[in-house]
Amino acid sequence: MARPSMDPELAMLLHGISFPNISQLTPDTIQTMRRATASPPDTVEKLAVRGITHETLRISTAGGNSHETILSLLRPSTTNSQSRPCIYWIHGGGLHWGDKLHTIEFPASVVLECDAVCVSVEYRLAPEHPYPAALEDCYAGIKWINEHAQDLGIDANRIMVAGVSAGGGLAAATALLCRDRRGPRLCAQCLSCPMLDDRNLTRSSHQYVEEVWPREANISAWKSYLGARFSNSEVSIYAAPGRADNLSDLPTTYLDAGSAEVFRDDVVAYASKLWADGVQAELHVWPGGFHGFEIFAPTAEISMTSMKVKMDWVKKIFSDKEK
């Protein structure tokens, strides 16, 4: 099958990385990936060296299914008498692995470059906790942050939801919940190579079957996350935002994907729906980028370019909303 080729520098770097076979998310595979993606013990120490403080927040959600949700609060170590913008971060990991400090590099850089606060949520993982557990954790966290913004030194008018891969899909779903539950009014959503649609019907989902996040892994992850709902025409838009027909009244949006990844066409389609419904959206499809290339190959030229473009967008959003 014809398909866009991978960026040569990325291909060379990828050749030197050993990935486990994740085409089927078996219990052993999931545990292997959880060990591999667990944040190193010195993560907080390394953040401190960069001038970022870390605080753990534990919040309780009300209702019959109440439980404790854990948040990481990252701030610049410098004092500031003014309230700061906030990037509410949702980590990646295929909905099955990762933790609140996994894939933290970009939002940590936002903390320093934008004099911002980052709040990262520890959401429950599938298969132990299928939909809607992860989403409800994400929503509970952003709702709590919005309600306690003043105490945390956060400007409630400048709260952006953001995430990568599975976290990007959860960020999109969180924005939909904020809209439909009349929750926090977000200033923007930043969706990096987001996991948006369970149906796997696009051309790109058939073009990339053996790369970092192959088609079979994507199908397996959605099956595990949705359970009996998988392949059901009634799958909720909050589970798979790509199914939403109405994206009006969502905040300004940034989306990106690589041209050489499974999610490419879903991301382009989501951007088109946003435009059709009157939402301002900026879309970047990076030539030859595989899924998550910024994370796996951060020193590649394409990665540094994409991260700079995204950072410039975040800076502009926070600056414009401050006025």
Image: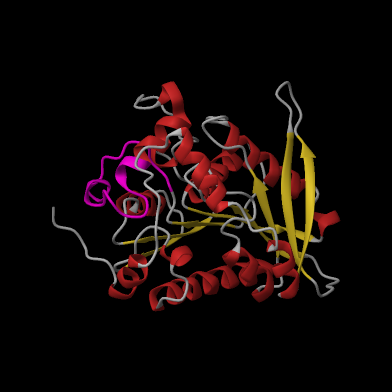
Residue 158, percent from left and from top? 67, 60
Residue 27, percent from left and from top? 48, 33
- Residue 15 against residue 213 in the figure, above or below: below
Give the dominant element type of the magenta stretch: helix, strand or loop: loop
Whether residue 11 is in magenta: the answer is no
- Residue 222 against residue 105 in the figure, above or below: above
User: Which colour scheme appears in the figure?
Assistant: secondary structure
- Please provide the residue range marked out in magenta: 195-217
Q: Nearer the viewer, residue 7 or 159?
A: 7
Q: Nearer the viewer, residue 303 or 31?
A: 31
Q: Quadrant of residue 82?
A: bottom right
Q: Nearer the viewer, residue 252 or 44?
A: 44
Whether residue 214 is in magenta: the answer is yes
Residue 141, percent from left and from top? 70, 44
- Residue 241 against residue 309 in the figure, above or below: above
Q: Residue at x 74, y 49 (%)?
A: 145
Is 261 positioned to the left or the right of 320 in the image? Answer: left
Kindly give the residue lying farthest to the bottom in the view shown: 301
Residue 123, percent from left and from top? 63, 41
- Residue 192 against residue 57 in the figure, above or below: below
Is 145 positioned to the left or the right of 177 in the image? Answer: right
**Residue 236, visible in the rendered structure:** no
**Residue 80, visible in the rendered structure:** yes
| Number of numbered discs overlaid on the protein picture | 0
Quadrant into which the C terminus falls: bottom right
Q: Residue at x 42, y 44 (%)?
A: 196
Kindly give the residue lying farthest to the left in the view shown: 1
Q: Nearer the viewer, residue 42 or 80?
A: 42
